[in-house]
Amino acid sequence: MGQTPQPPSLLIRPSEVEQVDRGAGIVTLPMVGKWNSTQSSVTTGVTSFAPGTGIPLHSHNVDECVLVLEGEATVTIGEDEFDVDAGVNTWVPAGVPHRFVNRGNSLMRIFWIYGGLQVTRTITATGQTFEHLSVHDRQ
């Protein structure tokens, strides 16, 4: 049995991925993206949130799908807010403001998929736009 699939396919082990510390108890494991695949049409990863933490209301230049893997989240999509638990999946079109906040007392983890390799995040409150997971794209 081989250790890795034939390129351009990828086999990504979380223990081998360099974490991105986004501050205030939020950590991201980037999985598939422009850093390891020029042929992919998606960007994926897992983000963990300590209790009470969340990323500010923001939007992206591409669609985003998020699956809550564990924990309890409050999700804002546009003007609406929802309390969700593990197993709930969201889809947010490009340009729609959204956010996830850990409303529970334990770790919350989400798996996210962006519909492209060139991903930006625009913070709703400031209008600032950053390249996804760049040094400026923290919390």
Image: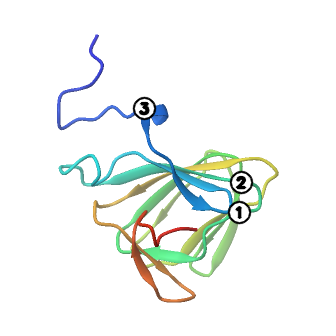
Does dot 3 land on a helix, a strand or a loop? loop
Residue under label 2 = 50
Amino acid on which disc 3 is placed:
Arg
Q: Which residue occupies 71% across, 54% down?
A: 50
Percent of width and height locating residue 96: 47, 78
Q: Give residue 53's mark.
A: 1
Looking at the rendering, in which quadrant would you find the N terminus?
top left
Q: Could you tell which of marks 1 and 3 lies nearer the N-terminus?
A: 3
Amino acid on which disc 2 is placed:
Ala
Which residue sits furthest top? 1
Which residue sits furthest bottom? 126
Percent of width and height locating residue 42: 31, 54
Q: Which residue occupies 25% across, 54% down?
A: 41
Does dot 1 land on a helix, a strand or a loop? loop
Q: In this view, does 125 lie to the left or right of 132?
A: right
Contact flag, marks 2 and 1 (Cβ < 8 Å) = yes
In this rendering, is residue 56 above or below 118? below
Q: Distance between the residues labelled 3 and 2?
A: 22 Å
How crowded pointer 1 is (Cα within 10 Å; few <14, some 14-19, many 20+) is rated as many
Residue under label 3 = 13
Amino acid on which disc 1 is placed:
Thr
Q: Which residue occupies 40% across, 66% down?
A: 132
Q: Which residue occupies 64% across, 76% down?
A: 80
Which residue sits furthest right? 105
